[in-house]
């Protein structure tokens, strides 16, 4: 089976590597254009491009795919490249561009998407973040047949995994990426022998995982402890939850909700400093912060952070980092 692959970040690279290892013919890879990154803002290839180039796969990077859009020349070149390769199917994973109808219709078996949720829950751009933020107990991977809607296509294969209490978006992402690679290989192997069957998504239980806005990362200490702890883990590794301490924007990377704080403690006030965590009062309950980062510094565990930042009970974080 010949396949084109469209994807950009590490989540997609893991799936592409699994398909390559399984022996699928991959004559063309589509990925986003190089973007500036790092302190020097030098152009950097996507994870998918870097991996593909290292293995001699053909890569194109259209800025758009609409034939009547701003990047019509790029779209036309992409169409010619796809038509020349005649893929049986296109596999899509976190590509970052909306596929117009001409792309969906071009491969003989259409386009299959690897989505990091159990559809129809968490359609959209940030399903891993939103599952952790919402306190979901389970999530998973759905391989679906793409249509013109936003993650509305028929489901072909799905598998769930537990979300652990301490999971961050980063740790959950890594497990889901491996699962996605395994499931897309299985889906294509079933498709090759006619054993892949579609199920229409139910109309009940639809939720949307909107893209994470950087402004959401500001910690509001008046919220309850569970909500704050989940958001801190959901925004790890990006964009990183932020709390203001003595005029500095400190990033918070790991937190655990505690059921009670000191009696009548004001939200944002430090009620305990221990080697395993700084305990901060919330609107209800408290959170134990166990990994923090000062501006320009490295991520530190609590003991390391307290060596360079004298904190005492009664000190406080501003109610909001905004």
Image (spheres, rainbow, N blue to C red):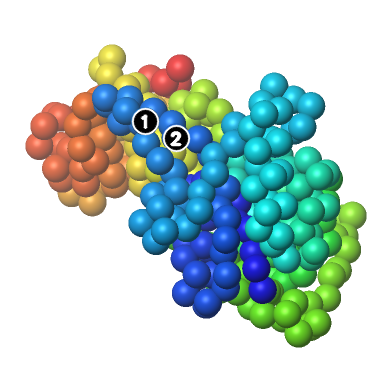
Q: Residue at x 74, y 25 (%)?
A: 69
Q: Secondary structure at mark 2?
A: loop
Please determine whether, in this image, residue 196 is positioned above or below residue 31: below
- Work out whether 44 lies above or below 149: above
Q: Is residue 12 left or right of residue 271?
A: right
Assess disc 2: are there few (<14), some (14-19) or many (≥20) residues with their C-alpha within 10 Å of its C-alpha. Answer: some
Between 184 and 305, the one nearer to me in the picture? 184
Q: Which label was assigned to residue 103?
A: none
Q: Is residue 158 above or below residue 28?
A: below
Residue found farthest to the left: 307
How far apart in space, not on screen, are marks 1 and 2 (Cα)?
Answer: 6 Å
Q: Secondary structure at mark 1?
A: strand
* Residue 239: percent from left, percent from top: 44, 34
Where on the picture, by quarter, is residue 317?
top left
For image coordinates 15% across by 37% down, the residue present is 306
**Looking at the rendering, in which quadrant would you find the N terminus?**
bottom right
Can you tell which quarter of the image residue 144 is in?
bottom right
Q: Which residue is mark 2?
A: 34
Residue pointed to by mark 1: 43
Residue 58 lies, in percent from the top left, at 50, 53
Which circle's residue, 1 or 2, is located before the other in the chain? 2
Q: Residue 29 or 196: which is nearer the viewer? A: 29
Q: In screen coordinates, is 29 left or right of 205? A: left
Q: Position of residue 259 (x, y in %)?
A: 46, 49
Residue 322 appears left or right of 77: left
Foreground of the two, 229 or 151:
151
Please tell me in which quadrant of the rendered image residue 247 appears.
top left
Q: Are marks 1 and 2 in contact (CB under 8 Å)?
A: yes
Q: Residue at x 53, y 77 (%)?
A: 23
Question: Measured from the top left, where is residue 149 in percent x and y?
Answer: 83, 45
Give the residue drawn at x 37%, y 30%: 43
């Amino acid at each position: 089976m010949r396949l084109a692959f469209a994807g950009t970040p590490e989540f997609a690279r893991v799936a592409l590597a699994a398909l390559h290892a399984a022996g699928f013919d991959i004559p063309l890879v589509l990925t986003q254009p190089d973007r500036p990154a790092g302190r020097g803002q030098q152009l950097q290839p996507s994870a998918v491009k870097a991996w593909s180039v290292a293995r001699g796969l053909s890569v194109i990077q259209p800025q758009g795919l609409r034939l009547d859009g701003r990047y019509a020349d790029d779209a036309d070149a992409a169409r010619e490249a796809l038509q020349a390769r005649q893929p049986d199917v296109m596999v899509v994973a976190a590509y970052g561009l909306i596929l117009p109808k001409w792309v969906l219709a071009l491969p003989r078996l259409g386009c299959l998407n690897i989505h990091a949720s159990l559809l129809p829950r968490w359609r959209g751009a940030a399903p891993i973040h939103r599952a952790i933020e919402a306190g979901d107990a389970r999530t998973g991977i759905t391989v679906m047949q793409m249509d013109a809607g936003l993650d509305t296509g028929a489901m072909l294969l799905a598998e769930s995994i537990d979300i652990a209490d301490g999971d961050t978006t980063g740790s959950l992402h890594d497990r889901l990426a491996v699962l996605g690679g395994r499931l897309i290989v299985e889906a294509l192997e079933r498709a090759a022998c006619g054993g892949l069957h579609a199920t229409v998504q139910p109309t009940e239980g639809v939720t949307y995982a909107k893209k994470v806005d950087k402004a959401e990362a500001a910690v509001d200490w008046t919220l309850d402890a569970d909500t704050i702890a989940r958001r801190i883990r959901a925004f790890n590794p990006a964009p990183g939850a932020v709390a203001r301490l003595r005029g500095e924007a400190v990033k918070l990377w790991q937190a655990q909700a505690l059921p009670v704080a000191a009696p009548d403690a004001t939200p944002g006030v430090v009620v305990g400093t221990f080697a395993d965590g700084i305990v901060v009062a919330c609107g209800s309950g408290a959170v134990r912060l166990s990994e923090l980062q000062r501006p320009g510094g490295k991520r530190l565990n609590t003991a390391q952070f307290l060596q360079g930042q004298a904190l005492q009970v009664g000190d406080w974080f501003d109610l909001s980092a905004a």
